[in-house]
Image: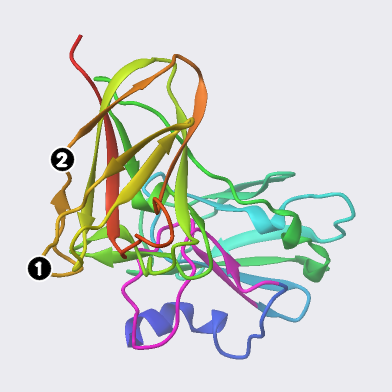
Amino acid sequence: MAEWIAVNGEAIYGTRPWLVHGEGPVRARGGNFKEDFAYTARDLRFTSKGDGVLYVFALDWPADHRIHVRSLGKFPGVVGRIADVALLGSRASLKWTHDADGLTVTLPDEKPCDHALALKITGESLSGFKPELAAPIIALVRPDAAGLIELKADEAELHGTQIQVEDKGGRPSVGFWDRPSESVSWRVGADRGGKYRISASCATVHQAAVLAVDADGKVVELHPVRTAGWDQFAETEAVEIELPPGGERTVKAGPRDAASWKAVNLRWIRLIPASP
């Protein structure tokens, strides 16, 4: 911690909140020392000094060396201006672009520290941005070379206020899924139709849990088996579904109904093309 503070302390000490606390898919749930969230480089946190300095913490190092800050998009009415972007702890000159989609920064090869990194953004009227206009961007999941579609927990859109992505067993999973009103979904880009076998990796301490999967109106039920704990995952028995050909589609997962819902942790759902 002392080493990390030595690099990033200026982004903490003497700072104030910005217009929003941050952005990204993981929404931390407080209480009970629950700190095992599966943060990614898309999860950002903001602090500021006056109206001319904004610090952006990325909670993981991006594999592609790029940080995208949607909250700094050049939306209509924005009066803020960015003059320079630097990485705390690094002397590297950063390449960056700024447009309607936000600020995109290319990081150097060498990390200045482990864990979260901090960008220092300087400019004018940085409180003049409009982060509330930055709609969440949900990744389009595409099949691999064999046609398999894997819907991962950290790529899901979460529908609800309690449901979260956390780290269980060293991998991201959807957890805190106690409320039957909450669900998850993915955007899938797959032209191929036909038969698929659907299965899921789940953990639950309950008997007779049911997870309903809706693929463009075709609904199947998966039955997670009871496991030894919330970090012990098992694959469900595969269920066959036939999908029409098409381009982009939505796959949802959630309760069959409120009365029968039992909490599960979900690591992934897979759609595997059935053999012809």
Residue 240 x %, y % = 25, 27
Spot occupied by residue 99 in the image (x, y as percentages of width and height): 73, 44
Identified by mark 1, the residue type is Ala
Report the span colored magenta. Answer: 20-47
Instruction: Spot the residue most to the front.
Output: 259
Residue beneath disc 1: 228
Marker disc for residue 17: none
- 43 or 209: nearer the eye? 209
Which residue occupies 56% across, 79% down?
11
Residue positioned 43% across, 66% down in the render: 59
Magenta span includes 64:
no
**Quadrant placement of the N terminus:** bottom left
**Residue 50 image position (x, y, % from top left):** 76, 81
Could you say whether the residue bearing mark 1 is in a helix, strand or loop? loop
Task: Give the structural element (helix, strand or loop) at label 2.
Answer: loop
Q: Which of marks 2 and 1 is in front?
A: 2
Is 196 positioned to the left or the right of 40 in the image?
A: left
Gap between marks 2 and 1, in whole Å?
18 Å
Alpha-carbon neighbours of circle 2 within 10 Å: few (<14), some, or many (≥20)? some
The residue that appears at 37% across and 70% down in the rendered structure is: 176
> Which badge, 2 or 1, comes first in the chain's sequence?
1
Look at the picture and state if 139 lies above or below 208: above
User: Circle 2 sits on which residue?
Assistant: 237
Q: Which amino acid does label 2 sit on?
A: Glu
**Relative to residue 101, is residue 266 drawn left or right?**
left
What secondary structure do most residues of the magenta stretch adopt?
loop
Check residue 36 for magenta coloring: yes
Residue 60 location, quadrant: bottom left
Q: In this view, does 178 lie above or below 66?
A: below
